[in-house]
Image (cartoon, grey):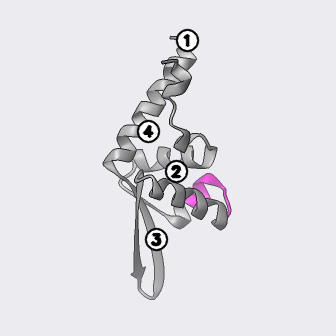
Amino acid sequence: MSLIHKLNKAFDHRIRLGIMSILVVNDFADFKELKELLEVTDGNLASHAKALEKGDYIKVEKSFIGRKPNTRYLATDLGKAEFSKHIEALEQIIKGR
């Protein structure tokens, strides 16, 4: 199998790559944090997060802080494992192996 086929299509888009990068190194991030760090619109972030959630790569937790709704995201074990494989494949491609 060529290295390019080891890449996970779920992480092809820069916003999904960014979401996973942030969630893999942090326990969680809330919607506002992700939006600011990635410099994306609400709709863009929501649609890409939904695609990652659908693939079971991230988990979404909704709660209230006081009266304000809060949505936070966590990488699942599957998400961490698949993202790690994706990054390893990228590194191999870059190194030309």
The residue segment tinted magenta is 34-41
Looking at the image, tell me whether mark 2 or mark 4 is earlier in sequence order.
2
Q: Which comes sooner in the sequence, label 1 or label 2?
A: 2
Is residue 67 shown in magenta?
Answer: no
Asked whether the residues under the numbered discs 1 and 2 touch, taking CB atoms below 8 Å apart as contact, a structural biologist would say no
Query: Most extreme residue toward the bottom, as rendered?
Result: 67
The Cα atoms of the two marked residues, 3 and 2, are separated by: 14 Å
CB under 8 Å between callouts 4 and 3?
no
Neighbour tally class for label 2: few under 14, some 14-19, many 20 plus, Cα within 10 Å: many
Kindly report the distance in space between the C-alpha atoms of the residues bearing marks 2 and 4.
Answer: 11 Å
Q: What's the mark number on residue 83? A: 4
The residue labelled by disc 3 is: 71
Residue at numbered disc 2: 19
For residue 32, which quarter of the picture? Answer: bottom right
Q: Secondary structure at mark 1?
A: loop
- Kindly report which numbered mark, 2 or 4, lies closer to the viewer in this rendering: 4
> In the image, residue 22 lies at what x, y percent?
48, 48
Q: What amino acid type should be assigned to the residue bearing mark 1? A: Gly
Identify the residue shown where x is 52% and y is 65%: 31
